[in-house]
Amino acid sequence: MAVIYLRHPKHGTKVAISDLEADNDAQNGWEEYDPNATVDLDDDMPDEPAAPAAAEPEPEPVEPVNELQPRRRGRRPREIM
């Protein structure tokens, strides 16, 4: 059984278990890759450091959506006369 590792820019990664599946996936934008291949990070790094990113504002606290109390299911209390 063949194990073929595939990568897609939108959907991420997956494993195809046959050549036919890999061929069909390749037609839909999947690319084959080797998970054991080493990556040289120095080639991807720029020579100059990037400018610091602007700080994002604090998100507002989220209030709970469901504020209703759950209904009890059971016998109704007896009315006293």
Image (spheres, grey):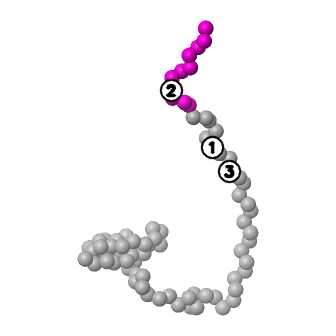
Asked if residue 79 lies left or right of residue 15, the reply is right
Give the residue type at disc 2: Gly
In the figure, residue 45 lies in which quadrant?
bottom right
Query: Which residue is found at the position 73% from the left and 60% from the top?
Result: 58
Label 1 sits on residue: 65
Asked if residue 13 is positioned above or below residue 72 in the image, the reply reads below
Dot label at residue 74: 2
Crowd band around label 1 with a 10 angstrom C-alpha radius: few (<14), some (14–19), many (20+): few
Compared with 61, 12 (above or below) is below
The residue lying toward the viewer, choosing from 15 and 9, is: 15
Query: Which quarter of the figure has residue 47?
Result: bottom right
Dot 1 amino acid type: Val
Camera-side mark, 1 or 2: 2
Looking at the image, residue 15 sits to the left or right of residue 52; the answer is: left
The residue pinned by badge 3 equals: 62
- Residues 43 and 61: in front is 61
Whole-angstrom CA distance, mark 2 to mark 3, is: 34 Å
In the rendered view, would you say 43 is above or below 17?
Answer: below
What residue do we see at 31% from left, 77% from top?
A: 3
Crowding near pointer 2: few (<14 within 10 Å), some, many (20+)? few
50 displayed left or right of 43: right
- How packed mark 3 is, by other alpha carbons closer than 10 Å (few <14, some 14-19, many 20 or more), is few
Question: Is residue 29 in view from this perspective?
Answer: no
- Residue 73 in the magenta stretch? The answer is yes
Magenta range is: 71-81
